[in-house]
Image (tube, rainbow, N blue to C red):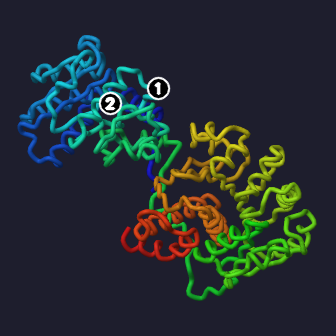
Amino acid sequence: MPIPLPTPQEMGFWDRQTIDEFGIPGEMLMENASREIYHFLKAKFRDLHQSNIVLFAGSGNNGGDAFALSRHLIQSKAKCLVLHTRELDEYSGDAAFHLNLARKSDVRMMKLTGYNLDGLNRPDIIVDGLLGTGFSGTLREDYQEWIKAINRLGRNRFVLSIDIPSGLNGSTGRPGPLAVKADCTVTFEEAKIGLLMPEAEDFVGDLRVRTIGIPDSIKQFNPPSVYGLDREVLDCLPPAFGLDHKGKAGRLLIIGGSPGLTGAPALAGLGALRSGSGLVTVAAPGGICREVKQGWPDIMTLPLGSGMIWTSDLLEPLKKMVFQSDAVVIGPGIGRDPDTVNFVHDYLKFQPRPTVYDADALFALAQDQLLMRKLPQNSILTPHPGEMAGLCACSIADVQKDRPRTVKELAKRVGCPVILKGPGTLIAAPESPVYLSTCSCSNLAVGGSGDVLSGMLGSLLSRTTNLLDAACLAVFWHCLAGKQLQKQYPYRGNLAQEIAHALPQCLDLCRKHG
């Protein structure tokens, strides 16, 4: 099953349902959370006896978790100091309940405001319970200073964050503008989406997910809006039968290429062949077709006319090949000439086959927002953030501010799956959750990588009818190839074509070793 990745608001709803409808008290959930952290620390350090542990307790539930944890640590004979952000008599609810238990256990407590952190003896373990997943926006100056102090004290010491490193946005994973750099984050019930966003990687450390008693029925009846992809998506791969011949292994047509961009459709063709297509044809203007073909004997070409750019009159001689194909990729290297934009618009109105719109085909779509709403449902769009900004008529900053919301809204608007590329690639369809690729791999950040992905998508579409499965599988598989190349090229330097070449091997390794 995909990995549930609730937003902070969805997790808060689960908590309230558990308390109000199911009847599990909030104090019990907090106790369960603190015990899970305690068991983790006990397993990691084995003997906490006489360990010097400083806990930072904020004003909310994370502070309550820290108070509850301090009680368990004291019972293990650790030396604990809780530094709290508000007056003790100002705490309320579940946090106040566990604060009172900690006071009865003689836990040392000091108010953080005005406390000289520079004079603090260097602890063995630092527990960050300042802010939870509900934080967003910009940190107050006092919190920024406290977080700087934690990071300074945490050099060469173990830092554990409760639920999320303080200062990180639980939805976007972005610091605001800084965050605790944890060695480990113990989060509860399910990983919140922000923890698995690429921006959070430098702060989260080793992520551990621990259950605290949220009933499965509550999660099942209130599913999250985002899921993370895992290796089970590989089960969507169309089977390879021993009696296959090239005509039954998927016929893919790639429409693309323009002066200076002839490698893009060839890389898409290579991605398609390496992901299992039997027959791949690149259609290109006749004046550049030899450049597309050069060096790629495995890829067939279809020269159209004698010019070098795409024009509407090239659609008619192309139609026969479109009908003979199982799927189409349009856009790699196709260019932005006004005549090319018109060609893409004409193809959209004609489109009889499942089609991947990539690269400058997306630029062409963005030029006519009304036409874009008439995309056939058997289409897939594959924008990077710049192309997404064009499709949504907004800025790149607006796209990146809330990527899950952006990709979901576009999928609903155009009525077909959309893949928002980049670190933490997202996939959405109109009536589905959003799926997040939790893999971030710098080896994929190379020119031509997206062309390989579009070819993979086209290959899978030529052999399956489920567009969303194909999109999720292609993104996950593409990432596996990047991870495989990371072993050979730890400092980058791989070529886009090597991403394609790695596809069969990385799939086999993943199936054998997980």
The residue indicated by pointer 1 is: 138
- Between residue 514 and residue 143, name the one nearer to us: 143
User: In this picture, is 91 found above or below 485?
Assistant: above
- Between residue 322 and residue 79, name the one nearer to us: 79
Task: Tell me: 390 left or right of 56.
Answer: right
Task: Tell me: 311 left or right of 173.
Answer: right
Q: Quadrant of the N terminus?
A: bottom left
Query: Which residue is painted at 47% across and 32% down in the image?
Result: 9
Q: Is residue 138 visible?
A: yes
Q: Amino acid at mark 2?
A: Lys
- Specify the farthest residue to the right: 313
- Location of residue 125 by image quarter: top left
Secondary element type, mark 2: helix
Q: Amino acid at mark 1?
A: Thr
- Location of residue 157 by image quarter: top left
- Between residue 490 and residue 316, name the one nearer to us: 490
Task: Tell me: 354 left or right of 160.
Answer: right
